[in-house]
Amino acid sequence: MATRDRNGTPSIDSVSLAIIEQLQEDGRRPYAAIGKAVGLSEAAVRQRVQKLLDQGVMQIVAVTDPLTVGFRRQAMVGITAEGDLEPVADALSTMEEVEYVVMTAGSFDLLAEIVCEDDDHLLEVINKRIRALPGVRTTESFVYLKLRKQTYTWGTGQR
């Protein structure tokens, strides 16, 4: 099961990790098949999955290839900011085109992955919206030419 340590971080046992691994391989895998693989009943798997979802340990989502659904441009944007980073990160997080936002240590204060329809859309997001945010000092864009690897198997021992 997933419990929380004294810092509030989920602590996950080996059976729950095995369930997560099964779902990472196939998010539509039936609970009965998962139960057989991890040694639990279908009901026990269903209960554990619901608890993992409720605790925010995992999500079950459909992952798309942006190119096949009409988004021709992806970029990572490095952002330097002044003052408190949280309001900038929060504002970025509300933008539909922003896939994820990371506060970093290093050359940039924040990294934001952006998925857009085309170059004009990307320019509008960076120039008119990101650069206009209070606290944003500079941006540097890294346009994706080709996505070579994308996995979602963190935390289960799969590599």
Image (cartoon, helix red, strand yellow):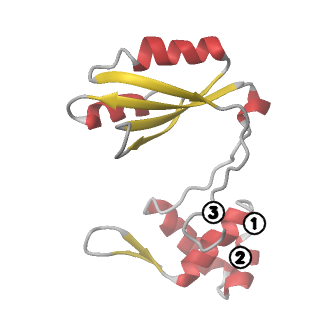
Q: Quick one: label 1, few (<14), some, or many (20+) residues within 10 Å?
A: few
Q: Could you say which is closer to the camera, residue 139 or residue 59? A: 139
User: Residue furthest toward the bottom?
Assistant: 39
- Name the image quarter holding residue 47: bottom right
Label 2 to label 3: alpha-carbon separation: 16 Å
Q: Quick one: label 2, few (<14), some, or many (20+) residues within 10 Å?
A: many
Quadrant holding the C terminus: bottom right
Pointer 2 and pointer 1: residues touching (CB < 8 Å)? yes
Q: Amino acid at mark 1?
A: Arg
The answer to which of marks 1 and 3 sits earlier in the sequence is 1
Looking at the image, which residue is at 74% across and 60% down?
A: 28
Looking at the image, which residue is at 53% across and 60% down?
A: 58
Q: Which residue is mark 3?
A: 153
16 to the left or right of 107: right
Could you tell me which secondary element the residue under label 1 belongs to?
loop
157 to the left or right of 112: right
Could you tell me which secondary element the residue under label 3 belongs to?
loop
Q: Could you say which is closer to the camera, residue 44 or residue 123? A: 123
Q: Which residue is mark 1?
A: 29
Q: Amino acid at mark 2?
A: Ile
User: Residue furthest toward the left?
Assistant: 83
Q: Amino acid at mark 3?
A: Thr
- Give the total of numbered labels: 3
Looking at the image, which residue is at 59% across and 72% down?
A: 156
Q: Quick one: label 3, few (<14), some, or many (20+) residues within 10 Å?
A: some
Q: Position of residue 53 (x, y in %)?
A: 51, 61
Q: Could you say which is closer to the camera, residue 124 or residue 47? A: 124
Looking at the image, which residue is at 43% across and 16% down?
A: 129
Q: Which residue is mark 2?
A: 34
